Image (tube, rainbow, N blue to C red):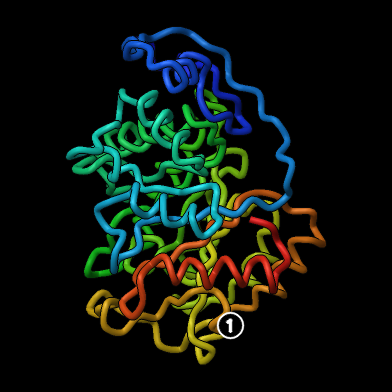
Amino acid sequence: MDRRKFLSAGALAAAGSAVGSQALAQAAGGQPPLPRPHAETLVPMVEVPPSQRYRISYTTNTRGGWEGDPFKGMAEAREVGFRYMEIFGASFARGPNAYYPNDYERLQHKIFQMGVQFCSITGGAPGGATAFEDPAQRQAVIDNHFEMARFSRRFGGLRWKTNLGRRRPGGTTDEDLRQMAETCNQLGRRMREELGMHLGIHPHLNSQLQDERETLYMMANTDPRYVGLVLDTGHITMAGMDPLALARKFGKRVIEFHFKDVHPRDRGGTKNVPGPEVDMMKTPYFFPLGKGGVDFKGLMAYLDSIQWEGFLNVELDTSPFEPPKEAARKSAAYITNVLKIPL
C-alpha cells in the first residue's frame, strides 16, 4: 500500500469515540468476530474541540505492581477515576497483548468495555531502531516510530510523544543533536502530512535528550509546525531545570505535559542529577502529586493565562512503598481537590 495514504480509522472520531458501530453491535448482540481490516484510502479525521480545556490522563506502566500488565494498570486507574490512558506501544506488541500493528479493532473493543480511551500509544516497537542521532539508521528510526504513531491515530490521538533513545556513555554531542533535530523534523513532517498528527519530543533522564542545553538546541533547530515539546515536570526538574520557567519559555509549543512530583529539596531544578545507577525501586525520586517539589499551582496559573489546552498526563515511574493504585489515588485527589480540575 502507498505509505502516503492513511489506513482506516473506522468510525472513530478525533475526539475519541469509543468504537465503530460494528464493534458496538458485537458487544451488544454477540455477533461473529469482526472481519480483518483491509487497506483503504481515507481523508484525515477532523479535529473536534474537546469539552474540557484540560484533559487528565494516566500512564499505567508503574513498576511495583503494574509492569507487564497494561490492562491491570488501566482497570485500577479507571477505578480511581482516570478516563484517559497513555500507554507505551511496546505493551501491545508482544505476548498475549500483541495487538500492534494490525489488531486495533479488538483492542478498541476491549478498552471500550473497560470504559477508558487512549490519550496516546507512544514510542517505537520492541527491537525497532531508536538511535535518532545516527544518520545511517534515520529511515529505520522514522519508520519504526511513524508506524506506532499511525496505530495511535486509529484511537483518535492527534499528539504523539517519544523519547529519543538511550543515552550513550559519552553523552550527547553537538553532532548528535544536529542529527537528532534532522530526524525529528523528518518524522514530524511525515506525521503531519500523512496522519495530521503533531510530534512531541520528551526530554527524559538517561536519554539522548536530557538536559537544558540539549532541550534548547532541539527546540531552536526543529520546525514548530512539525515538532513540539512534551514537558515532564519530574524529568525536567531532576535534569536540573525549572519546569515552570521552561513552560513559560515555550508556551503553546508544549503539546503535552507529564505530571509527576519530586522532593521539595529539588524544587526549581535539582543540584544532584541522578544517573542510571540509581535503583528507583529502592530510592525513588519521583512521587505522586502533592509531595511539594513541583509548583503545580504556578504552572496551572500560567497555562490558564495563555489559554493552553490539551492533556495533562499523570505518570509515576515506580511505586516501591505502596501499590500503584494508591499512588494514583493520591494524584487524583490532588488534581481534583487542590488544582480543581475534574478527571
Q: Could you tell me which quadrant the N terminus lies in?
A: top left
Q: Is residue 174 among what the camera can see?
A: yes
Q: Is residue 124 left or right of residue 258?
A: left
Determine if residue 6 is in view: no
Tell me if 147 is positioned left or right of 118 in this view: left
Can you give x and y, in whole percent of width and height, for residue 297 in the image?
Answer: 71, 74
Q: Is residue 35 above or below residue 102?
A: above
The residue pinned by badge 1 equals 268
- Residue 296: image quadrant is bottom right
Image point (70%, 69%), residue name: 339
Vertical arrangement, residue 159 with respect to residue 42, above or below: below
Expressed as whole percent of the image width and height from the top left, the position of residue 189 reads 51, 32
Q: Assign a secondary structure to mark 1.
A: loop
- Relative height, residue 95 to residue 169 (above, below): above
Instruction: Tell me residue 99's x, y (percent).
Output: 29, 31
| Nearer the observer, 236 or 10 | 10
Give the residue at the far right of this rendering: 305
Residue at left offset 29%, top offset 45%:
91
Q: Residue furthest front?
A: 29
